[in-house]
């Protein structure tokens, strides 16, 4: 028979353990779309069964970048050379240089000096590219060159028609399909109106990026690859943006979405984030930034 002091001691010990757990500071928690707890193993298992995986990151969040790397490694172990990487952070007209770097034709120094790389490339994206080089994985530059996105922002889709053939090969085929009622574009328009910079071309510039990424993702998937794509969460949240265009170019692909959000309280997924993606990675609001 348990002595009362023993039972009391066990109860106190349990309280200490629970208290210690609650005082821990997890760097992230993964939830399903419905707000149920999940773990990295669940995420990896679902990813390798998909045709396309979109890792929706917060561009300056170190947990996003670390988990992108870990998911890439995990999927590569399962899929081998069938895995292809793609990223918003590389523009289509830099594809040749990206290929030359991965193949070893040019040095890292040459690539980094000549390609138009994001300011946080060395800390956040270089590890992904270097892994692709080491393991000879294909890495696709999926985004439209920024000068053409700027052209759309200033003059609309129509301005793209005046570009020559070589230029048109760096973005989705014309005419660019567009649905201004999608919330990812209508909300952008509303934000522009609130800031006093309203222009119907603002969301169109976003759409031409989504269309281009979707088009080149589908092109790569048609070769039988499983595509792991890195992009800002806004481009794939709520299964809009890139996914809308992928569905336009190729129906019935198995697409898995991941979103990254910040919350001060990580014990449960806030209602505003439910449904954003198949998996939602919650990181602390106090998390440090990479730039």
Image: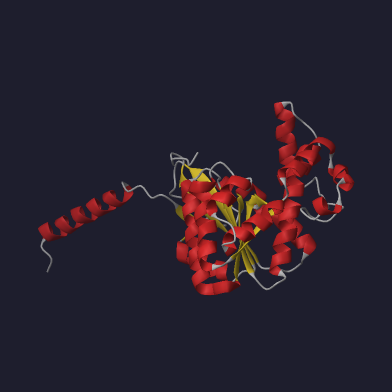
Could you say which is closer to the camera, residue 78 or residue 186? 78
Q: Position of residue 243 (x, y in %)?
A: 70, 57
Report the front residue among 274 and 9: 274
Above or below for 234 versus 278 = above
Q: Position of residue 107 (x, y in %)?
A: 55, 55
- State whether residue 96 appears in this view: yes
- 16 or 107, which lies in front? 107
Q: From the viewer's perspective, is residue 80 above or below residue 86?
A: below
Query: In the picture provided, is 127 more to the left or to the right than 204?
Result: left
Quarter holding the N terminus is bottom left
Q: Residue at x 46, y 50 (%)?
A: 63
Numbered disc total: 0
- Which residue is at a point 74% across and 41% down the rendered structure image? 147
Against 81, residue 151 (above or below) is above
Q: Position of residue 241 (x, y in %)?
A: 71, 51
Which residue appears farthest toward the top when viewing the image?
196
Answer with the quarter of the image where residue 97 lies: bottom right
In this picture, residue 177 sits left or right of residue 69: right
Vertical side of 16 occupied by 46: above or below: below
Q: Position of residue 50 (x, y in %)?
A: 61, 69
- Say which residue appears at 23% left-offset and 56% top-offset: 14
- Which quadrant of the figure has residue 286? top left
- Regarding residue 117, the answer to whether it shows in the image is no
Coloured how?
secondary structure
């Amino acid at each position: 028979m348990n002595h009362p002091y023993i039972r009391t001691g066990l109860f106190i010990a349990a309280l200490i353990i629970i208290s210690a757990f609650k005082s821990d500071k997890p760097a992230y928690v993964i939830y399903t779309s419905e707000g149920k707890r999940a773990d990295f193993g669940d995420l990896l298992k679902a990813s390798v069964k998909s045709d396309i995986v979109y890792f929706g990151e917060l561009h300056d969040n170190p947990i996003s970048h670390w988990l992108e790397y870990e998911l890439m490694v995990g999927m590569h172990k399962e899929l081998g050379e069938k895995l292809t990487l793609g990223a918003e952070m590389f523009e289509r007209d830099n594809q040749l240089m990206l290929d030359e770097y991965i193949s070893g034709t040019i040095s890292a120094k040459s690539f980094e000096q000549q390609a138009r790389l994001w300011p946080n490339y060395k800390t956040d994206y270089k590890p992904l590219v270097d892994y692709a080089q080491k393991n000879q994985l294909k890495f696709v530059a999926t985004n439209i060159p920024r000068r053409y996105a700027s052209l759309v922002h200033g003059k609309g889709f129509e301005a793209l028609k005046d570009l020559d053939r070589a230029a048109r090969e760096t973005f989705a085929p014309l005419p660019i399909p567009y649905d201004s009622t999608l919330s990812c574009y209508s909300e952008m328009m509303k934000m522009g109106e609130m800031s006093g910079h309203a222009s119907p071309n603002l969301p169109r510039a976003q759409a031409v990026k989504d269309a281009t990424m979707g088009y080149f993702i589908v092109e790569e998937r048609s070769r039988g690859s499983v595509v792991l794509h890195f992009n800002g969460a806004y481009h794939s949240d709520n299964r809009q943006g890139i996914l809308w265009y992928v569905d336009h170019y190729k129906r019935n692909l198995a697409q898995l979405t991941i979103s990254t959000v910040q919350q001060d309280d990580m014990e449960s997924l806030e209602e505003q984030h439910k449904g954003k993606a198949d998996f939602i990675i919650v990181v602390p609001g106090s998390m440090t930034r990479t730039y």
